[in-house]
C-alpha cells in the first residue's frame, strides 16, 4: 500500500527554534510538493520539486524556510528560526508528472505535520 | 481573478443532494480535480474530469464542467453523514495544482 509518509505528525516548539519536517514520497514518483494549511489562508503551495530539482519555491518565505531533496526518497522542509505565525499543518504530496499537453497530474498527500510555535 | 474560488460552507440534510461550485482561472487546464479532506487527514483525490468532457458520473458523484464560464461543480447524490468533509477543486497549471480555498460540507442527520 504505497503512501506518502511524513514525520513528525505533531511538533510543538518555542519561537526561535529550528524545525525540520520530513517527507517520504511514494516510490517512483518524480514530483514533490510542500503545502501549508491554515484557517486564514487555506492551502498554500510553498515549494515544488521535479526529479529532485526545485522548480518553484515562490510561495516560501526565503529568509527562514528552506526545502531540499537530499535523495529521491526524502524531502525536507526546514524553518529557522521558527515564529508563532508559522503554526499550521504542513503537507507533503508526491506525484508522477507526465510530459505532454494532456498530462494527468494526480497528487498523493501525506497525513501532514501539525506545527505549533509558542 | 487569479484565484480558484469556492464558497466556504455548505450545509445539507442527510439524503439530500449537495452541490459544490468552483470557478477556475486557467482555460488551458487539461484536467480539473476534486479532492476531499476529512478531519485530521491529508487531501485525497475524489474524482477528476478531462477538459473535453462536460460531465462525468461516478456512482453518487457527478462533475459538471462549463468551459466557457470556467465553472466546475460537484454534485453528491443522497448525501451521507460520512460525506462531511472539506472539498477542494483544483486546476492544473503546468503540472502544479492550484487549489481553491475548500468548501466545508456539513451533513445534518
Image: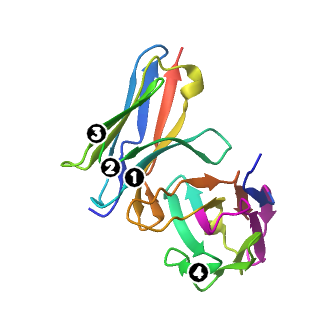
Q: Residue at x 67, y 44 (%)?
A: B41
Give yes or no for contact between labels 2 and 1 (Cβ–Cβ under 8 Å): yes
Subunit ID for the residue under disc 3: B
Mark 4 or 2, which is nearer the eye? 2
- Decide: few, some or many residues near mark 4? Use Cα within 10 Å; few <14, some 14-19, many ≥20: some
The percent coordinates of residue B102 (x first, y second) are: 46, 46
Q: Which residues are magenta?
A: A9-35
Subunit ID for the residue under disc 2: B
Instruction: Pick whichever, B58 or A79, lies toward us.
Output: B58
Q: Which residue is mark 4?
A: A54
Q: Secondary structure at mark 3?
A: loop
Q: Which residue is mark 2?
A: B51
The quadrant holding residue B27 is bottom left
Subunit ID for the residue under disc 1: B
Asked if badges 3 and 2 are on one and the same chain, I answer yes
Mark 1 or 4, which is nearer the eye? 1
Instruction: Pick whichever, B24 or A61, lies toward us.
Output: B24
Give yes or no for contact between labels 3 and 2 (Cβ–Cβ under 8 Å): no
Q: Which residue is mark 1?
A: B31
Q: Which mark is residue A28?
A: none
Q: CA distance from mark 2 to mark 1?
A: 6 Å
- Decide: few, some or many residues near mark 3? Use Cα within 10 Å; few <14, some 14-19, many ≥20: few
Q: Which residue is mark 3?
A: B54
Q: CA distance from mark 4 to mark 2?
A: 28 Å
Amino acid at each position: 500500500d504505497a503512501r506518502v509518509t511524513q514525520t513528525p505528525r505533531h511538533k510543538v516548539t518555542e519561537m526561535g527554534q529550528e524545525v525540520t519536517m520530513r517527507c517520504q514520497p511514494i516510490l517512483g514518483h518524480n514530483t514533490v510538493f510542500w503545502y501549508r494549511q491554515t484557517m486564514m489562508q487555506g492551502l498554500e503551495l510553498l515549494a515544488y520539486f521535479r526529479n529532485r530539482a526545485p522548480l518553484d519555491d515562490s510561495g516560501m518565505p526565503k529568509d527562514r524556510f528552506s526545502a531540499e531533496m537530499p535523495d529521491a526518497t526524502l524531502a525536507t522542509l526546514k524553518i529557522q528560526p521558527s515564529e508563532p505565525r508559522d503554526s499550521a499543518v504542513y503537507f507533503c504530496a508526491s506525484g508522477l508528472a507526465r510530459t505532454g499537453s494532456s498530462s494527468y497530474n494526480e497528487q498523493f498527500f501525506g497525513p501532514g505535520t501539525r506545527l505549533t510555535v509558542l | 481573478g487569479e484565484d480558484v474560488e469556492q464558497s466556504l460552507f455548505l450545509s445539507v440534510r442527510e439524503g439530500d443532494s449537495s452541490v459544490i461550485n468552483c470557478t477556475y482561472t486557467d482555460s488551458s487546464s487539461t484536467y480539473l480535480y476534486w479532492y476531499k479532506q476529512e478531519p485530521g487527514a491529508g487531501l485525497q483525490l475524489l474524482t477528476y474530469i478531462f477538459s473535453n468532457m462536460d460531465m462525468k458520473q461516478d456512482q453518487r458523484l457527478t462533475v459538471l464542467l462549463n468551459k466557457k464560464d470556467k465553472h466546475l461543480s460537484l454534485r453528491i447524490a443522497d448525501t451521507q453523514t460520512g460525506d462531511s468533509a472539506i472539498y477542494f477543486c483544483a486546476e492544473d497549471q503546468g503540472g502544479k495544482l492550484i487549489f481553491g480555498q475548500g468548501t466545508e460540507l456539513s451533513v445534518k442527520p
